[in-house]
Amino acid sequence: MEPEGSLLYAIKAAAVDAAANVWTFGAQKTMYGGKHVRPGDHIAVFDSENEGGLGLVARGVVVHVEACPKRSGIERQTPRVTLTIASRGRAIRRLGRVELKALSLSGRGDSPEAELHFKLYRQATNKIVGLSVPAAVFLHTYF
């Protein structure tokens, strides 16, 4: 059972305005269980450092999800969704690629920090990912 208000998902996306009250992200890749995101789910929002962002900026609640149709002629297309997130808080300290790498190297290979580093930064692409309960609990300490 997840802790109350746990962050079950994370999204890494380009140009996130941390001060916004609502974000809409179009046609986002889903990986590591991210395709199961539904309205009401809690989500951590990372501003993509690949595009000049700051890493973790906020948390929110998914208010709308719409699956994007697959394009014809592509055999193995990653599922994509468009979603709208209502802000529920800003990050109180920095957590990005550099911090997660350092934390994951200093801990166990199965630590929440290692999970987040692997899921968000192993590939440079922006994406929505599912999180384990330990990773959700760890992220919660940043708000």
Image (spheres, rainbow, N blue to C red):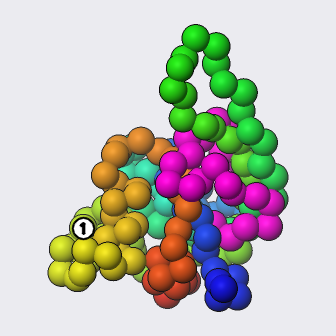
Range covered by the magenta-colored residues: 23-43
Q: Dot 1, how many residues are within 10 Å of its Cα: few (below 14), some (14-19), or many (20+)?
A: some
In this picture, residue 54 sits left or right of residue 122: right
The x and y percentages for residue 90 are 59, 75
Q: Residue at x 72, y 48 (%)?
A: 83
The x and y percentages for residue 114 are 31, 71
36 within the magenta span: yes
Q: Nearer the viewer, residue 129 or 98?
A: 129
The x and y percentages for residue 15 are 52, 47
Give the number of callouts. Answer: 1
In this picture, residue 129 sits left or right of residue 94: right
Report which quarter residue 38 is drawn in: bottom right
Q: Residue at x 40, y 58 (%)?
A: 119
Which quarter shows the N terminus?
Answer: bottom right
Q: Residue at x 52, y 85 (%)?
A: 137
The x and y percentages for residue 10 are 55, 62
Q: Is residue 83 above or below residue 96?
A: above
Residue 139 shows in this picture: no
Q: Is residue 11 above or below residue 105?
A: above
In this picture, residue 133 sits left or right of residue 26: left
Which quarter shows the C terminus?
Answer: bottom right
In this picture, residue 108 sits left or right of residue 40: left
Q: Is residue 10 above or below residue 93?
A: above
38 within the magenta span: yes
Q: Which residue is mark 1?
A: 101
Q: Amino acid at mark 1?
A: Lys
Q: Residue at x 77, y 49 (%)?
A: 65
Q: Nearer the viewer, residue 94 or 124?
A: 124
The local secondary structure at tag 1 comes to helix
- The residue positioned farthest toward the top in the image shown: 73
